[in-house]
Amino acid sequence: MDLTLRGRNAIITGGTKGLGLATAKRFVEAGAKVAVVGRTQDALDGVVKQLGVTGIRADVSIAADVQRAFDEATNALGPIDIVMNNAGTAKALPFEKLTDEILQADLEQKLFAAVRLIRFAWPHMRDRRWGRIINVLNIGAKAPQPASAPSTLSRAAGMALTKSLAHEFAPHNVLVNALCVGFIEADQHVQAAARAGVSFDDYAAKRVKEIPLGRMGLAEEFANVALFLASDASSYVTGTAINVDGGRSPAV
C-alpha cells in the first residue's frame, strides 16, 4: 500500500510535541510539505530544525491568529491539501467547577479553531476536488466519563462537526475523519503525572490496567493512522471517528 503524500501540503495545529510532532514527522517522511502551528517559539524552532517544516507561532483559540497562521502556511507552501486539527489538551473538572469562561475557552481552542481552519482550507479543496481533514478528539467524545467536562463536551461537538462536514464535502472528494485518542505516551500525560506527584512509570502502570492491549500507545502509532487518513489509500473512508486507544473505549 502506497502511503505517499508527495505533492501535498499540510497544516498541523498543536504540532510541536506529542501526537502533532509525530504526525508532522510521518507526513514529511511521506513527501508532504508541512506547516506546524504552535504557541511556543522555542519549540517551533526545534521542530523546524529537526524536520525542515514551516513553523508558525499562533494561538488557535484566537480567531485572528487562525487566519494569520493559515495565510502564512499558504504563502510558504502553496494551497493546503491536508488539515489536521490537533491543538488542545484534555481538561476535566467536576460540574460545579465548570464555569462559562472555562467552557468557552475550551470550545474556542478545540471546536471553533477547527471550524475556522477548515473554513479557510475548504474552497481550495473543493476546487481541486481533493482534500483531507483530520480532527483529533479523544475517546471521551463517544463515551464520556463523570467529571470529564469541558474536554468531552468540546470533543463530542468535534465529532458531530466531523460527521456533518463529511456528508457535505463528500461530493467534492474532500474526506473528513476524526481520530479518538486513548492513553498515548504524550506530553499531557507527563504533565498529569507531575501534577499528581507521581513518576510517569507509576502513572502509566495505573492507566494500562484499563487497556486491553496492556500498554500505553506510542505517538508514532497514532501518526501511522493519521498518515493513512491523509493519503490516497483512504479514498473510501469519510465520516468516521477511529479509536486509537488499544481497545479501551467501550464505544466503537
Image (tube, rainbow, N blue to C red):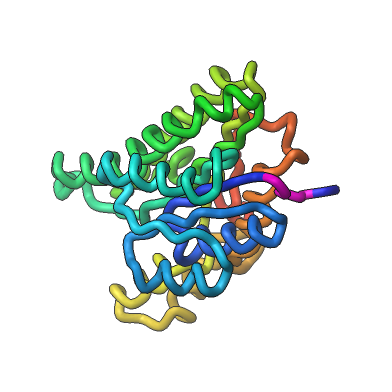
* In front of the other: 138 or 212: 138
> Is 79 drawn above or below residue 165 in the view shown?
below
Residue at image coords 36%, 43%: 110
Front residue (pair 231, 240): 231
Question: What is the x, y in percent for residue 17?
Answer: 46, 66
Please tell me in which quadrant of the rendered image residue 100 appears.
top left
Q: Residue 203, image x and y in percent?
A: 43, 74
Nearer to us in this view, 97 or 133: 133
Residue found at the very far front of the displayed protein:
75
Residue 84 as seen in the image, left or right of residue 229:
left
Can the viewer see residue 203? yes
Residue 14, image x and y in percent?
42, 56
Counting from the top left corner in percent of width and height, residue 92 is at: 30, 53
Q: Is residue 80 above or below residue 40?
A: above
Residue at position x 22%, y 50% in the image: 94
Residue 22 is left or right of residue 61, and the answer is: right
Q: Is residue 40 left or right of residue 206?
A: left
Front in this rendered view, residue 139 or 82: 82
- Quadrant position of residue 120: top left
Instruction: Locate the C terminus and report the quarter of the image it occupies.
Output: top right
Q: Residue at x 40, y 41 (%)?
A: 155
Overall secondary structure of the magenta stretch?
loop
Q: Read off the magenta span.
A: 3-7
In the rendered image, the vertical position of residue 238 relative to residue 151, given as above or below: above
Q: Is residue 241 visible?
A: no
Q: Residue furthest right?
A: 1
Q: Residue at x 85, y 48 (%)?
A: 1
Q: How many marks?
A: 0
Q: Is residue 162 magenta?
A: no
